[in-house]
Image (spheres, rainbow, N blue to C red):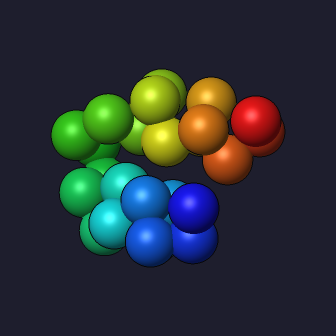
Amino acid sequence: GLSDSQQCRSNRGHCRRLCFHMERW
């Protein structure tokens, strides 16, 4: 969801790979 994408972006360097993957999904 958008919430996940936004939160992930906020955690720069935390789970950027996971965030990117989720966003691509």
* Most foreground residue, 15 or 25: 25
Residue 12 makes an appearance in the image: yes
Residue shown at the point (62%, 30%) measured from the top left: 21
Relative to residue 20, is residue 12 drawn left or right?
A: left
Residue 9 makes an appearance in the image: no
Q: In which quarter of the view is residue 24 placed? A: top right
Name the spot of residue 10 as percent of width and height, x first: 31, 68
Q: Is residue 2 above or below residue 16?
A: below
* Most foreground residue, 17 or 7: 7
Relative to residue 18, is residue 25 drawn left or right?
A: right
Residue shown at the point (57%, 70%) measured from the top left: 2
Q: Is residue 2 above or below residue 14?
A: below
Q: Is residue 25 above or below residue 9?
A: above
Q: In which quarter of the view is residue 11 placed? A: bottom left
* Residue lying at the far front of the rendered structure: 1
The quarter of the picture where the C terminus appears is: top right
Count of numbered circles in the view? 0
Q: In which quarter of the view is residue 7 placed? A: bottom left
Q: Is residue 7 above or below residue 13?
A: below
Residue shown at the point (57%, 61%) measured from the top left: 1
Relative to residue 24, is residue 6 drawn left or right?
A: left
Name the spot of residue 14 as percent of width and height, x first: 22, 40
